[in-house]
Amino acid sequence: MTPEQARQWLEHAPADPGKIADGLRGWITIDEHFYCAVCTGRLLKRGCANWTIGASPVWDPEAPPGPCAACGKGEAPPAAAATAPSLSDP
Ligand SMILES: [Zn+2]
């Protein structure tokens, strides 16, 4: 499944992704695209499941690898040290 296919399939997928497991942020497919739990839930409800072969779930507290390849949303990685005040040595 390419991100383009995912977007096409999502156009006709049920809007409701169903119940999402606590802490499940999404999935990384074997071609290393991240899809959020909402998009993957909707794809499964539509019957599109070939992307699940070899895919790995992403759970809290793992940082998701970026925005969803299909919707661009999903869980963004927590902005960790980047926004913290610098405490580096003078
Ligand atoms: Zn998504």
Image (cartoon, grey):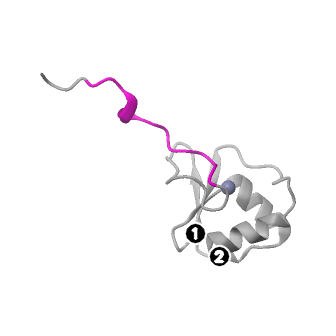
> Residue 1 appears at what percent x and percent y?
65, 76
User: Farthest residue in the left direction?
Assistant: 90
Q: Main secondary structure of the magenta part?
A: loop
Please say if the residues under marks 2 and 1 sit with CB atoms less than 8 Å apart: yes
Looking at the rendering, the stretch of residues picked out in magenta corresponds to: 72-86
Give residue 56's quadrant in the image: bottom right
Residue type indicated by callout 2: Met
The kind of residue tagged 1 is Thr
User: Residue at the location (72% across, 48% down)?
Assistant: 21
Task: Confirm whether the magenta stretch covers residue 57.
Answer: no
Q: Position of residue 3 (x, y in %)?
A: 63, 69
- In-front residue for pair 20/6: 6
Q: Residue at x 71, y 66 (%)?
A: 7
Q: Position of residue 57 (x, y in %)?
A: 60, 59
* Residue 10 relative to residue 66: left or right: right
Disc 2 marks which residue? 1
Q: How many residues crowd around disc 1 within 10 Å: few (fewer than 14), some, or many (20 or more)?
A: some
Please indicate whether residue 82 sits to the left or right of residue 8 in the image.
left
Q: Quadrant of residue 69?
A: bottom right
Q: Which mark is residue 29?
A: 1
Determine crowd level at label 2: few under 14, some 14-19, many 20+ residues with C-alpha closer than 10 A: some
| Identity of the residue drawn at 52% across and 42% down | 61
Q: Is residue 13 above or below residue 88?
A: below
User: Is 78 included in the stretch rendered in magenta?
Assistant: yes
**Position of residue 24 in the picture relative to residue 85 (left or right):** right
Badge nearest the viewer, 2 or 1: 2
Rendering quadrant holding ligand 1: bottom right
Dot 2 falls on a residue whose secondary structure is loop
Which of the two discs, 2 and 1, labels the residue nearer the N terminus? Answer: 2
